[in-house]
Image (cartoon, rainbow, N blue to C red):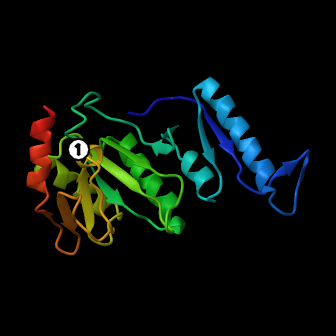
């Protein structure tokens, strides 16, 4: 899923005039500069990430990661090829102040072969960053639970977390709130170290059958 395309970083503000930094952001000039960088990046096949979030540069510079298409990816371990309709992910939402250390732990877990694949959004949303930790087959509950136990053991799970199959994403099924399990087929309860299936699992299996 990840590749090694170059990455261009664009600073959203303040704007730069010559060799000096303007004391106030110049939005129109900054927007023009970013548009030109985007066009240039497309010609190189590169990814452009704006540095509006102070965490972004540290997330991108984390060892063993690759930036692609607006995400930062960990190493992908075997299997390299899999049915994209079977993939799914545990979703973590570390606050911006905790995103960098959390992502470094996840990226190192990928490098050590403890997880299959993961990605993080370098842009914060509502004060947190989304980390997706993937498994290749959501219909394998043993592997899905093994992965979330590893995340828990690494200190990354402080509250219930949810697992969403990619087939729901392809079908346009999303949660309205992070506490909802409408788009999640598993919930992990860290206080009990227990994973439970949700009512949505049967729907995900039906969609998987239709996609074959």
Residue 129 is situated, as x and y percent measured from the top left of the image, at 47, 60
Task: Please identify the quadrant where the N terminus is shown.
Answer: top left
- The residue drawn where x is 52% and y is 65% is 96
Compare residues 36 and 54 and report the one nearer the observer.
36
Quadrant of the image occupied by residue 152: bottom left
Where is residue 20 drawn, in percent x and y?
Answer: 91, 51
> Is 126 placed above or below 44 here?
below
Does residue 171 appear to the left or right of 99 in the view shown?
left
Which of 41 and 156 lies nearest the eye of the viewer? 41
In the rendered image, the residue lying farthest to the bottom is: 191
Q: Is residue 45 left or right of residue 11?
A: left
Residue 41 in the image, given as x and y percentages of width and height:
64, 31
Q: Residue at x 52, y 58 (%)?
A: 100
Identify the image quadrant of residue 170. Answer: top left
Q: Residue at x 17, y 55 (%)?
A: 145
Secondary element under disc 1, as helix, strand or loop, is helix
Residue 109: percent from left, percent from top: 36, 48
User: Would you name the residue on which mark 1 appears?
Assistant: 167
Question: What quarter of the picture does the C terminus occupy?
Answer: top left
Residue 44, relative to residue 69: is it above or below? above
């Amino acid at each position: 899923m990840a590749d090694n395309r170059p990455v261009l970083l664009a600073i959203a503000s303040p704007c730069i005039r010559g060799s000096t930094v303007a004391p106030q952001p110049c939005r129109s000039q900054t927007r023009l500069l970013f548009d030109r960088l985007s066009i240039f990046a497309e010609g190189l096949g590169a990814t452009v990430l704006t540095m509006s979030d102070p965490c972004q540069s540290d997330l991108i510079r984390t060892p063993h990661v690759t930036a692609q298409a607006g995400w930062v990816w960990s190493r992908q371990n075997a299997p390299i090829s899999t049915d994209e309709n079977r993939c799914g992910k545990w979703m973590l939402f570390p606050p911006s102040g905790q995103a960098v250390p959390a992502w470094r732990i996840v990226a190192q877990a990928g490098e050590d072969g403890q997880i299959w694949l993961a990605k993080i959004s370098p842009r914060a949303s509502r004060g947190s960053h989304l980390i997706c930790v993937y498994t290749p087959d959501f219909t394998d509950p043993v592997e899905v639970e093994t992965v979330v136990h590893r995340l828990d053991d690494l200190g990354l799970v402080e509250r219930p977390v949810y697992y969403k199959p990619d087939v729901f994403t392809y079908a346009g099924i999303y949660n309205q709130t992070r506490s909802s399990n409408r788009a999640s087929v598993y919930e992990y309860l860290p206080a009990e170290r227990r994973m439970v299936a949700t009512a949505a699992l049967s729907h995900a299996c039906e969609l998987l059958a239709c996609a074959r």
